[in-house]
Image: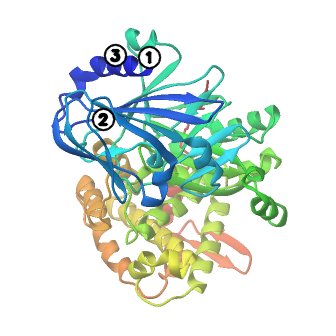
């Protein structure tokens, strides 16, 4: 009874804003029980409907949800991958229990993980989505036991006094993204730290497996390397980003074996876009601060925040941008010298050139997770962005650049909670600068069946490689563009709190 009353208080507080949507925006009331690891969910809709379907992520995941019942006397029918409810009344709620402990015990990607007392779960498995939501965002309030915290990709909102009076709780808005986009929510004993940057904040959670000294090292490292992304156009691409750091030893024997055989400061990273924007970094807290500073993964993943989701066909564009910038932005921020950045790009181009495959670059990208032609795809994409960056600077006398287009794209089109076709993305970048460079080079590169001629590009930029020795030629035709690409930019220090 207490949970239902608080749910209706929540509805009343939000009805003014939610009624403005043409669709019926759901609002969720959650209560987490630490002892049972169960989550009590109340999903409420403001409008009446002849029928509502509440979809689960997949048929196999429906067994995580129990005790579904409506606040009216009407029933709920279970289907193959959804529940349906007829004669839905205005303000009615669906209540159910989600077994977060069971989800976390799966220890599978895009399902869940147990990390000590912390539970990491995919919210798509326990936040049922009503088919009447349309394009509207959702609202959510969660009540947590004392000493427990939550990290989510959602956007935290200030709680009205009436909600705050209900006890310890957090209020969120949930961006409406495609149901099959990955997301992760962590609930446990941890502190979420805010790294404030111009243009936005990184909300960092370091999960179980690092001691106090290691946590300080990891926080300071992220605050330090995040300055590199500011060297693109002076601002974080997005206003609010969840960052989950997972110590490598917490993911079972396989991950510990990998860490022992191939020790790295950062073993894996990914940018995920479901229900907001987030980065996940699999780290080895035992590695030194110098090893973390030399690692490229965090800057690569932060660079993914600059573009929308481009689908499989556009993965060579997306990964190419991040691969190009993982070196260039670190040079601008002083984490690499310009010579080191060009040398690492050269090494990558050589690896990509060695991995030849069948079909065009676009075809290879669309089939990347089956063919595993990662080197060709990532580094062909990096060659595209370097080529475009050089072309813009050359043709404009240094007035136009890749980062100018991306900065304007940030202002017009980010965050983006839908998939863009790659042709539309490059056409938009062209339109923002009044050029055709991005699209013309896109058509050229996407149809390539061989690796791009990066050696010719390096010659024009004045980058010469003689064995293991790299020299920079100040008299080359595009030496000015080369110098501008890696020139240091002032980057204000990040603030942690």
Mark 3 neighbour class, 10 Å CA radius: few under 14, some 14 to 19, many 20 or more? some
What secondary structure is marked by label 3? helix
What secondary structure is marked by label 1? helix
Q: Is residue 495 visible?
A: no
Q: Nearer the viewer, residue 72 or 16?
A: 72
Q: Nearer the viewer, mark 2 or mark 1?
A: 1
Tell me the quadrant of the picture where the N terminus can be found.
Answer: top left
Taking the view exactly as shown, the residue that stands out farthest to the bottom is: 358
Residue 2 numbered tag: 1
**In the figure, is residue 412 to the left or right of 105?**
left
Q: At 60% across and 28% down in the image, what residue appears? A: 149
The image quarter containing residue 20 is: top left
Residue that label 3 marks: 9
Residue that label 2 marks: 26
Give the alpha-carbon distance from disc 3 to disc 2, as whole Å. Answer: 15 Å
Measured as percent of width and height from the top left, residue 114 is found at 68, 46
Measured as percent of width and height from the top left, residue 476 is found at 51, 71
Say how the picture is coloured.
rainbow
């Amino acid at each position: 009874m207490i949970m239902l009353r608080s749910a209706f208080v929540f509805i009343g507080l939000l009805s003014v804003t939610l009624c403005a949507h043409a669709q019926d925006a759901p609002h969720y009331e959650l209560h987490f029980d630490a002892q049972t690891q169960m989550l009590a969910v109340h999903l409420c809709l403001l409008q009446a409907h002849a029928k509502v379907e509440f979809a689960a992520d997949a048929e196999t995941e429906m067994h995580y949800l129990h005790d579904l019942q409506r606040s009216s006397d009407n029933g709920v029918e279970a289907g193959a991958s959804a529940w349906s409810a007829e004669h839905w009344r205005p303000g009615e709620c669906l209540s159910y229990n989600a077994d977060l402990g069971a989800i976390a015990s799966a220890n599978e990607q895009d399902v869940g993980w147990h990390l000590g007392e912390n539970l990491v779960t995919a919210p798509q498995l326990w936040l049922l989505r009503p088919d009447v939501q349309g394009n509207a965002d959702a609202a959510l309030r969660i009540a947590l036991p004392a000493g427990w915290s939550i990290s989510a990709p959602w956007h935290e909102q200030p709680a009205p006094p009436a909600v705050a009076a209900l006890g310890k709780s957090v209020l969120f808005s949930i961006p409406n993204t495609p149901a099959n986009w990955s997301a992760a929510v962590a609930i446990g004993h941890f502190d979420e730290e805010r790294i404030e940057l111009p243009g936005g904040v990184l909300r960092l959670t370091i999960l179980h497996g690092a001691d106090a000294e290691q946590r300080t090292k990891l926080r300071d490292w992220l605050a330090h390397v995040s300055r590199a992304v500011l060297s693109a156009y002076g601002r974080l691409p997005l206003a609010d980003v969840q960052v989950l750091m997972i110590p490598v030893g917490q993911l079972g024997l396989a991950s510990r074996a990998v860490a022992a055989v191939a020790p790295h400061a950062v073993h894996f990273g990914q940018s995920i876009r479901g229900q907001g924007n987030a980065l996940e970094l699999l780290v080895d807290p035992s590695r030194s601060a110098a090893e973390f500073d030399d690692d490229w993964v965090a800057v690569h993943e932060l660079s993914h925040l600059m573009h929308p989701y481009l689908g499989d066909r556009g993965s060579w564009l997306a990964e190419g941008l991040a691969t190009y910038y993982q070196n260039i932005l670190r040079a601008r921020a002083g984490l690499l010298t310009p010579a080191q950045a060009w040398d690492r790009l050269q090494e990558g181009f050589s690896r990509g050139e060695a991995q030849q495959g069948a079909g065009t670059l676009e075809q290879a990208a669309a089939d990347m997770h089956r063919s595993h032609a990662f080197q060709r795809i990532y580094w062909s994409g990096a060659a595209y962005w370097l080529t475009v960056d050089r072309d813009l600077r050359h043709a404009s006398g240094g007035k136009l650049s890749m980062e100018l287009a991306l900065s304007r794209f940030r202002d017009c089109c980010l965050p983006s909670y839908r998939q863009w076709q790659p042709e539309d993305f490059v056409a938009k970048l062209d339109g923002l600068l009044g050029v055709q460079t991005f699209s013309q080079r896109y058509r050229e590169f996407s149809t390539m069946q061989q690796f791009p001629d990066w050696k010719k590009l390096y010659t024009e930029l004045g980058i010469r490689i003689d064995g293991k020795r790299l020299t920079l030629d100040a008299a080359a035709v595009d030496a000015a563009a080369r110098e501008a690409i890696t020139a240091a930019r002032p980057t204000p220090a990040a603030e942690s709190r």
